[in-house]
Image (cartoon, coloured by chain):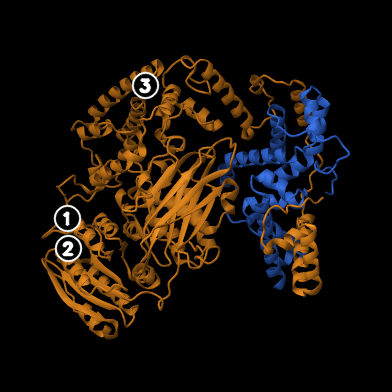
């Protein structure tokens, strides 16, 4: 039975297996047999392999010889009818179960493609034939058909919403637009890579409540400033005309930009239009602690406070460090895993891109030059914030070595230098200085930071980690409150290799976005500490990673293969998106990753119904500058469909945990993609995970939090008339935007556009009525 | 192998390539012989992937339909085996994709209750372990090993099914065997 595969180089490690399976050539075989004769250990290994083989062989499934007679008969009749006209497929026998409707789908698509090629101007709007005669919107039926058949990449479907949006208001799903799609394929109006980051920037500015020079510190609820806060979970706010203005297309917005502006979520992207996902790494975890704190106190968090990636990254992923497969000297180990996801309709995979940075031991790490910048303003007296900060920093002091130095700056209305950089060998001095901290006055964060940076630069050591640690409730209200200017200063200093870690405490006026952006711009990390447990996690368990960066400016680019992946969507990292062309532009700022840190990025992929050709799902590229190095390094990994697990429950528990936490975060941020999903399902999964991973207190805590939130969760998507109308208007506006984005419109598309515009005008009038002050 | 109808081996019979040519020339019987020859191994393969006989039959039937409609170009002495396995595999994955969500819901995601140890003889315990570990292998390793153990395909043929180089198949198979062997060793050490 053997044919030798000797043309392929294989290492000596595989030779026993090769021998067992007869894949060695004669010479190799003789050599091995000679060795076997003298090496008892090798013989034992071979015997073990044989046992395994025998067990496998014995476990062959008992399958009777062939297909059921009626199936074979059906095949024969098909064979005798060859060559069959394509159309025969449609009428093909009823034995085909609904679940195995692949043939039918394939057949229809073929027919439809032929039709559209032969007669592009008059062909029907959809491959499924449900709008054969007209351009009218026939939503519900169309949607059901589409879902029932999980059809082929349909010229008919809305670009962005794909099959992912599954809200109760789905009934106004935009009608398919075959013509529109056909034009879009040829047109080049969708220059997303370029436009998206700009849109994101706009979106961020909006969510921070300022545009350009005006920084409005008072805005706490990002939803409100995004246009209207009708879905903010508590206090509803409707802003009348603003709602209407917000719904309309702004300037030359692309559909994807519009989607982001509406929902603040990453859109579902068609691979054919944009196969690339490029983003800066982010290992922050602050959002999870913040979210937990809100929920424990019985509130739903504001949408902008929930960052999916930070929630996911707060959990342990147990990714092996480099050295398992990679060289132990490598900066990263990359771990890829995928499985069909239960949180999306059929045909969707969840892909996890996991990075694990190399470990650095306490003894190996560089010495530290730390400067604490502590907010001692009046607001820090509330809820024991100051006590928490002091205790946290004391924990940190426990971790330092004698060759580290620590300085202390405080600020209220002005900044004060409290303790010049002091070596770890005199840590009693540091403790004393920390214990002497008291509160009072306003918050001049800028001056505190400037002083802190100045101190860190004075004590700057080239061989050390130079870092400012800012602890604050994050609301600057005196002195320089212009975040942009503070950021500029921070950024300038960070080029001198002084990094920044921010520690957020307190709630209410805790300006989380402010601290996150500060940290991002200061090449640092952002933590939110709400309890001593959390402080221990950040400053004891993850201390070295928090302090010592191993990779700078790290960015990831995932390229999906359009032959395999029909649509993709990144979960989280909304404000970390980079322009595609900046992936290899090393002057563009990206993310820092500390020793031993784990980072996980998740994608929901909708696969092609029929995968033909190479089975690559995605190519993952990681690019970074090793700490201390001048040159960037880039590595690449491939992930094929065969590498995916066949079922969700066969994937690793930590993979399922990441997916489940992400789903929870998506719920909490009212992600449009999570609408209509089942919270109960999530609860059951969290319970199962907590049983399976009961040794991990965070997972147990996660389950408790999910349970505790069940009641609150009912308020996530208010379903009153106005909210539903706004949903409908958004969806129609997106359709309109898609149509308008086409460079040339066919007669059909023009008609459809007119129709959509009419519907939009009507909806707008209804909205206006509802929004009139009563 | 054991069933004696491996396409690559039964040189005494008419080669697949020839049968396919006959079929294209109008011989329904030639096609039926191809079905006869390959259905058993494809069914076992698909059942292994899908763990369900009925759905495996769906997939195998569809595989043969593909053979009818889009016959591959194989030489007159060539075997249709790798092509059939490849198509069958792709179809099985397609089917799994469409089913997963519902299926998982039905199974209520509870971790499967395993029988208590004292109910099991050592033998069944090992068997259960083999199955469990088998299920945990990455799909690619499972398939490659399956084709090797149960169908006796060469590395080159497996490579053709999976779309990888023969050398890679060697690695994949080796990894899978190592893993299973280690797990078995660990259990027997207990």
Q: Secondary structure at mark 3?
A: loop
Q: Earlier in the sequence, mark 2 or mark 1?
A: 2
Q: Which chain is blue?
A: B
Q: Is residue A122 left or right of residue A27?
A: left
Q: Secondary structure at mark 2?
A: helix
**Can the viewer see residue A69?**
no
Q: Secondary structure at mark 1?
A: helix
Is A560 rendered above or below residue A729? below
Q: What whole-number distance in Å separates the C-alpha atoms at marks 2 and 1? A: 12 Å
- The residue identified by callout 3 is A744
Q: What whole-number distance in Å separates the C-alpha atoms at marks 1 and 3? A: 45 Å
Residue A320, how many percent across, how many down?
Answer: 51, 64
Give the numbered dot on residue A485: 1
**Can the viewer see residue A218?**
yes
Q: Which chain is orange?
A: A
Answer few, some or many: residues within 10 Å of disc 3's Cα (few below 14, many 20 plus, some between 14 and 19). Answer: some
Is A326 rendered above or below residue A750? below
Marked residue chain, label 2:
A
């Amino acid at each position: 039975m053997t044919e030798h595969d000797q043309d392929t180089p294989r290492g000596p490690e595989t030779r026993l297996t090769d021998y067992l399976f007869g894949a060695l050539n004669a010479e190799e075989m003789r050599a091995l047999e000679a060795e076997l004769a003298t090496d008892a250990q090798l013989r034992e290994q071979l015997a073990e392999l044989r046992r395994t083989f025998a067990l496998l062989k014995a476990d062959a499934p008992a399958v009777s010889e062939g297909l059921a007679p009626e199936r074979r008969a059906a095949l024969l009749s098909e064979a005798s009818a060859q060559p069959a006209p394509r159309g025969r497929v449609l009428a093909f026998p009823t034995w085909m179960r609904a679940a195995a409707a692949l043939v039918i789908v394939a057949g229809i698509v073929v027919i439809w493609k032929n039709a559209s090629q032969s007669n592009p101007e008059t062909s029907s709007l959809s491959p499924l034939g449900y709008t054969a005669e007209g351009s009218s919107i026939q939503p519900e039926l169309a949607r059901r058909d589409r879902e029932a058949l999980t059809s082929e990449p349909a010229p008919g479907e809305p670009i962005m919403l794909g099959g992912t949006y599954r809200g109760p208001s789905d009934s106004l799903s935009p009608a398919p637009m075959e013509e529109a799609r056909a034009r879009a394929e040829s047109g080049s109006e969708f220059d997303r890579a370029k436009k998206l980051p700009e849109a994101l920037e706009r979106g961020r500015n909006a969510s921070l409540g300022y545009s350009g020079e005006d920084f409005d510190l008072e805005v706490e609820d990002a939803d409100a400033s995004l246009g209207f806060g009708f879905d903010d979970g508590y206090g509803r706010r409707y802003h009348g005309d603003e709602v209407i203005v917000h719904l309309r297309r702004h300037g030359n917005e692309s559909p994807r930009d519009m989607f982001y502006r509406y929902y603040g979520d990453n859109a579902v992207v068609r691979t054919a239009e944009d196969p690339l996902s490029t983003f800066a790494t982010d290992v922050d975890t602050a959002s999870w602690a913040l979210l937990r704190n809100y929920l424990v106190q019985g509130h739903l968090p504001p949408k902008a406070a929930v960052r999916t990636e930070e929630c996911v990254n707060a959990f342990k992923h147990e990714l092996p460090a480099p050295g398992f497969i990679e060289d132990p000297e490598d900066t990263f180990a990359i771990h890829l895993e995928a499985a069909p996801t239960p949180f999306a309709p059929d045909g969707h995979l969840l892909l996890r891109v996991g990075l694990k940075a190399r470990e650095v031991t306490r003894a190996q790490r560089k010495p530290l030059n730390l400067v604490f910048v502590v907010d001692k303003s009046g607001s820090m007296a509330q809820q024991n914030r100051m006590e928490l900060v002091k205790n946290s920093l004391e924990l940190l002091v426990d971790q330092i070595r004698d060759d580290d130095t620590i300085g202390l700056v405080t600020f209220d209305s002005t900044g004060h230098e409290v303790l010049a950089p002091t070596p770890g060998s005199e840590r009693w001095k540091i403790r004393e200085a920390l214990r002497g901290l008291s509160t009072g006055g306003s918050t001049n964060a800028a001056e505190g930071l400037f002083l802190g940076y100045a101190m860190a630069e004075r004590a700057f050591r080239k061989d050390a980690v130079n870092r400012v640690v800012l602890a604050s409730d994050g609301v600057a209200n005196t002195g320089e409150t212009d975040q942009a200017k503070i950021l500029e200063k921070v950024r300038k200093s960070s080029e001198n290799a002084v990094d920044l870690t921010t520690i957020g405490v307190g709630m209410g006026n805790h300006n989380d976005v402010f601290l996150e952006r500060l940290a991002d711009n200061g090449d640092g990390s952002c933590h939110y500490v709400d309890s001593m447990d959390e402080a221990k996690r950040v400053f004891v368990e993850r201390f070295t990673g928090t302090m010592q960066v191993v990779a700078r400016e790290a960015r990831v680019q995932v390229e999906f293969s359009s032959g395999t992946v029909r649509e993709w969507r990144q979960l989280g990292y909304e404000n970390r998106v980079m322009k595609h062309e900046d992936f290899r532009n090393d002057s563009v700022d990206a993310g820092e990753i500390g020793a031993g840190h784990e980072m996980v990025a998740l994608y929901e992929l909708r696969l092609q119904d029929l995968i033909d050709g190479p089975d690559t799902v995605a190519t993952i590229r990681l690019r970074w500058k090793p700490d201390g190095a001048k040159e960037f390094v880039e590595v690449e990994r491939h992930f094929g469909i065969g590498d995916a697990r066949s079922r969700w429950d066969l994937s690793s528990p930590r993979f399922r945990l990441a997916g489940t936490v992400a789903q929870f975060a998506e719920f909490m941020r009212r992600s449009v993609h999570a609408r209509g999903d089942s919270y109960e399902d999530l609860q059951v999964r969290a319970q199962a995970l907590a049983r399976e991973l009961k040794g991990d207190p965070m997972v147990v805590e996660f389950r408790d939090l999910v349970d505790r939130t069940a009641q609150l969760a009912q308020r996530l998507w208010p379903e009153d008339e106005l909210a539903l109308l706004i949903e409908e208007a958004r969806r129609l506006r997106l359709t309109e935007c898609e149509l308008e984005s086409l460079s040339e419109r066919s007669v059909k598309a023009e008609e459809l556009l007119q129709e959509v515009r009419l519907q939009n005008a009507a909806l707008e009038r209804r909205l206006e009525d509802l929004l009139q002050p009563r | 192998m054991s069933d004696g109808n491996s396409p690559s081996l039964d040189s005494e019979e008419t080669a697949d390539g020839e049968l396919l040519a006959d079929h294209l020339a109008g011989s329904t019987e030639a096609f039926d012989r191809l079905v006869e020859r390959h259905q058993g191994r494809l069914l076992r393969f698909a059942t292994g992937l899908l763990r369900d006989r009925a759905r495996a039959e769906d997939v195998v039937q569809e595989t043969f339909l593909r053979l009818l409609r889009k016959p591959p170009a194989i030489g007159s002495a060539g075997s249709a085996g790798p092509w059939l396995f490849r198509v069958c595999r792709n179809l099985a994955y397609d089917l799994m994709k469409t089913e997963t969500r519902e299926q998982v819901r039905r199974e209520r995601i509870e971790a499967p209750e395993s029988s208590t140890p004292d109910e099991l003889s050592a033998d069944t315990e090992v068997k259960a372990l083999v199955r469990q570990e088998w299920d945990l292998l990455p799909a690619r390793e499972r398939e490659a090993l399956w084709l090797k153990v149960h169908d006796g395909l060469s590395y080159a043929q497996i490579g053709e099914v999976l779309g990888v180089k023969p050398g890679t198949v060697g690695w994949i198979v080796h990894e899978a065997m190592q893993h299973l062997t280690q797990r078995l060793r660990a259990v027997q050490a207990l």
